[in-house]
Amino acid sequence: MNKETLSQELIRRGFVNQTTFKKMQDLDDTTRTFYLGVDPSAESMTIGNLASIMMVRAFIRHGHKALLLIGGATGMIGDPDGKNEERDLKSITEIEKNKKAITGQYKTILGELPFEVVDNYAWFKDINYLDFLRDIGKRVPMRQMLGRDFVSKRLSADGTGISYAEFSYVLIQAYDFLHLHKEKGVTLQICGSDQWGNSIAGVDLIRRATGNEAHIWSTPLVVNKSTGVKFGKSEAGAVWLNPDMTSPYQFYQFWLNLDDAGVDDYLNIYTELSEEDINAVMFEFEKDKSGRAAQKLLAYEATKIIHGKNTADSVKKISEALFGVAPFEALSKNDFIELIRELGETTVVKDASLIDALVAAKLASSKGEARRFVEAKAVYINGTQVDSSFTKLTNDVFIHGHLVLRRGKNSQTVISQQ
């Protein structure tokens, strides 16, 4: 079987929205230096950003040279596109902290693949304002900037207005492309579809300033097919790549609970499984959707990319134990550490009373209520239902010094021995 070209892989995996190439196969004609930009607007990227970085992995694997831009300068302004009102400005300290964190996430996601991180603050910090207006501002038509949808909306009678700083954001990003074109030989910007307008401004500026040709390849924003909502949100909010902001277990559960309608797309975007492997799991999934084979594979593969194989193995085992698919006895000491982070922990003395443990863990408000829960057979230890004959937490019910105490369907915590 012939190896896929880059354009073939991008098309198959759904990484195609708009491009300046006359035909998509033009991407395969020569090796290019490209860049992807992200502003340090938070201490972590989200799974929305992850889709673009998975596309970056494909470009690198096919021999293209990657520059990953962290917008230390643009982050001081904030992209106004898609915003109905002015952003709150980030402090310099916050921006620096976010830049370091995002750089670390790039290293995690791209692993051993070659890439270079650049920061546009490095070339903007010493720019003379008048020189910038003469050399760059003169080459950017106002019609181009005023024609942007978000500008029109913000300047309309019902709009909130727009500051000169946010209005100039597109000019700053366009200059990034020109600077990287001159200094690093960049001829291609890849981006999400929401950045198409900003990217086109850079292509136009390169043509006006140098006479050279540059290109854009954009990918669609991932949308939940069942809800129509932009991908990357859960009931708890954004799904972050930072384990302190979205725990590995929550991260795994997000993928596990995704809609049936989009799971084929998500497997192509968020994993590097072969077409044959994806077709095989989708065949199994279509035979029995209740088994959620596709979501299980997606959850494991996506978690492995962000948090590593060991953590992916751990949260998979934890999930299976909590949902009654596998015994708690299969969990290791490290698995319980992850479980404690997710469920919390209550420490008890040796041979503690079950009733006292339920109250201490706040699974019952009083001893009387705890007894009623036990009598109603609503209490479980390590997934096994207990009754009124069970009174003490003896050594034999602990696993590596821990057990999982549950009341009802969802209220549970880890009980640890002193």
Image (cartoon, rainbow, N blue to C red):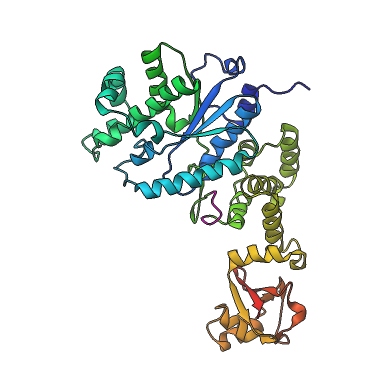
Q: Quadrant of the C terminus?
A: bottom right
Q: Going by the image, does 400 lie left or right of 254?
A: right
Q: Is residue 11 above or below residue 282?
A: above
Residue 121 spot, x, y in % from top left:
39, 35
Q: Hey, which quadrant is residue 286 in on the image?
A: top right
Taken as a whole, is the magenta stretch helix, strand or loop? loop
- What are the residue bounds of the magenta stretch? 241-245
Q: Going by the image, does 89 lie left or right of 276?
A: left
Q: Is residue 139 above or below residue 382?
A: above
Q: Residue at x 34, y 37 (%)?
A: 80
Based on the picture, tell me whether residue 362 belongs to the magenta stretch. Answer: no
Residue furthest left as drawn: 157
Could you tell me how many numbered marks the image carries?
0
The answer to which of 381 and 248 lies nearer the viewer is 248
Residue 75 spot, x, y in % from top left:
38, 40
Q: Going by the image, does 79 lie left or right of 69?
A: left
Based on the picture, tell me whether residue 242 belongs to the magenta stretch. Answer: yes
Q: Is residue 86 above or below residue 18?
A: below
Residue 39 spot, x, y in % from top left:
43, 39
Q: Going by the image, does 196 lie left or right of 66?
A: left
Q: Residue at x 64, y 76 (%)?
A: 415
